[in-house]
Image: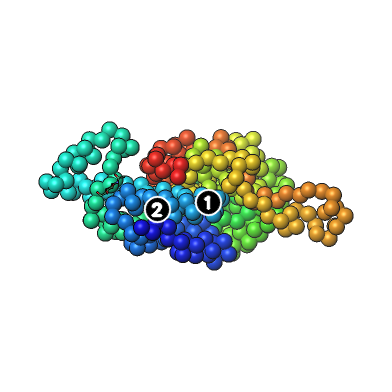
Amino acid sequence: MDKMMDEIVSKLVKDIRYGEIKGTYNIVVATINLLKYLINNANWITAKDLIEIIILNGKHLIDAFPLEASIGNMVRRILKIIREEYMLELKKKSDESDFQESLHKLLTAEAEDDVDFNISVPSLKPSLIDRLNEFELELETCSENITKLAPEYIESNDIIMTFGKSTLVEEFLKTAAATKSFEVIVAEGGPSLRGIEMASSLSEAKIQTTLLSDDLMFALMPKISKVIIGAHTVMSNGGLRAISGCGTIARAAKYYSIPLIVLLPLYKLSPLSVCSYKQDGFTKYASPLSGVISGANAALLERVEAYNPVYNYVPSDLVTLFITNMGSNEPSCNHKLISELYHPNDYKL
Ligand SMILES: *[C@@H]1O[C@H](CO)[C@@H](O)[C@H](O)[C@H]1NC(C)=O
Ligand SMILES: *[C@@H]1O[C@H](CO)[C@@H](O)[C@H](O)[C@H]1NC(C)=O
């Protein structure tokens, strides 16, 4: 049996590596499409075979992109869906006599570790495909569910600080602006300076916006009523990997006891924790020539080592609240969410 679907997996790896597919949401959608393709086309009979196939191919993708935690999150979501659908379909069969014995054992299994996934249930495939189609549709509502909550968390007369550019934060602020009047201060977000784009988009939407040099974040913080940022990944301990500079804005907010709100589509919530610059898969380094050091100064380039990390770690004690597509929660509640989203046997793949 051919369990590794080389061609289709390699194609996705290539598409992500060469930027044909970019942005976390698009990567998530492509990953789910791939897993759905495997369920439809790979050669499997029992849930046990299928779980192996999903893990084997999923790990290949995960290893190719250690920074894209959402890929692993989606592999784990699909594994949990397979486990659940298998149990549901088996229960439906409970009246069929030839299933009785194994079923009884299954339904009374103490731990899920004892569940035997090696029983063939022909109705599993169609029910899985239905469930995945639903899951895909639901995913489309993710950012809308978050931006819908904006009017609950933004008051008129708020002065909000944000950092650089996040499409989700941008939409969140624009949604609130339909009913509230507030001010936004955008730190420009060096060295990429994408805050400039963010500020002009907000002011085009008639939001009173000021662009701020990153150096002034600390000085201005006492005037701010809340800080709102996005994240690349949220770890199981509630800490986050966010664009470089978010560590500084978060510390300034904490120093002045200003609430820090993080917008979190749940596909970014990982059951793992990588939080050290020394760990593989925590950050990547961009060329220091893009904004950190000038290429014109050849003498200096020879003598200094310059680093330009793309991500910062923001520890959970700096975060006040996560706003997710299922509501809002404090960082300490992440463990509960994780146990609802993923099966513990799949945390480590
Ligand atoms: C799973 O079931 C098949 C067919 O019933 C059997 O041949 C195979 O040995 C079983 N595998 C395991 C690991 O129990
Ligand atoms: C968005 O909210 C609706 C209604 O509360 C819910 O049914 C749906 O599952 C949510 N979507 C996601 C992706 O959580």
Lateral position of residue 279 relative to residue 287, left or right: left
The residue at 45%/39% (across/down) is 334
Ranked by sequence position, the earlier of labels 2 and 1 is 2
The amino acid on which the numbered mark 1 sits, given as a three-letter code, is Asp
Q: Marks 2 and 1, Cα distance to the nearest angstrom?
A: 14 Å
The residue at 67%/49% (across/down) is 309
Lateral position of residue 282 relative to residue 175, left or right: right
User: What percent of the width, then of the height, locates residue 345?
Assistant: 39, 40
Residue 270's place in the image compared with 172, above or below, is: above
User: What percent of the width, then of the height, locates residue 156?
Assistant: 52, 49
Report the disc number at residue 63: 1
Instruction: Kindly identify which residue carries mark 2.
Output: 54
The residue at 68%/45% (across/down) is 217
Residue closest to the eye, 198 or 86 = 86
Q: Quadrant of the C terminus?
A: top left
The amino acid on which the numbered mark 2 sits, given as a three-letter code, is Ile
Residue 174 can be seen, yes or no: no
